[in-house]
Amino acid sequence: MSGDSIEKIKKGFKLNWMNLRDADSGKILWQGNDDLSIPDREHEARVPKRILKCKTVSREVNFTSAESMEKFHLVQTVHFKGKVIEGN
């Protein structure tokens, strides 16, 4: 894939919203609609403390792309109190 194609995909990609739910009840515990698709930048989300009481948490991510993408994958690292608890 050429550099021009990659730049075109980046420009046309937008993360519309993301939420975290209690996977057992389906209740949304946190939702954000900041554009988190800006590359090479750390994004921070402050979630409510009660999320720690959940047995399982699910993530839902909604995005749009003006360009077709193949082999798309999402890389996410979760930190808690300065330590990586998920990812890397």
Image (tube, grey):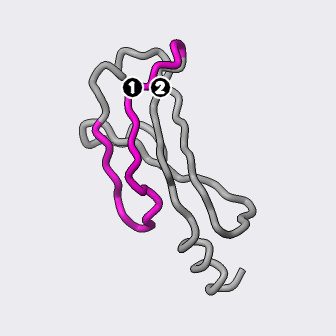
The residue indicated by pointer 2 is 21
The stretch of residues the image draws in magenta is: 24-46
**In the image, what residue type sits under mark 1?**
Leu
Say if mark 1 contacts mark 2, CB within 8 Å.
yes
What residue did someone put label 1 on? 29
Q: Position of residue 7 (x, y in %)?
A: 57, 80
Left or right of 13 in this view: 79: left
Residue found at x 52% / y 34%: 59
Is residue 42 rendered magenta in the image? Answer: yes
For residue 73, above or below residue 25: below
SS label for mark 1: strand
Q: Position of residue 47 (x, y in %)?
A: 31, 33
Distance CA(mark 1)–CA(mark 2): 5 Å
Q: Is residue 50 left or right of residue 62?
A: left
Q: Secondary structure at mark 2?
A: strand
- Few, some or many C-alpha atoms within 10 Å of disc 2 (few <14, some 14-19, many ≥20)? some
Q: Residues within 10 Å of mark 1 (few under 14, many from 20)?
A: some
Q: Is residue 61 left or right of residue 81?
A: right
Whichever of labels 1 and 2 marks the residue nearer the N terminus, that label is 2
Identify the residue at horizontal 57%, vertical 52% (top origin). Answer: 63
Q: Amino acid at mark 2?
A: Arg
Question: Residue at the location (56% across, 65% down)?
Answer: 13
**In the picture shown, does residue 21 fall above or below 74?**
above
Q: Is residue 16 magenta?
A: no
Q: Report the front residue among 52 and 6.
A: 6
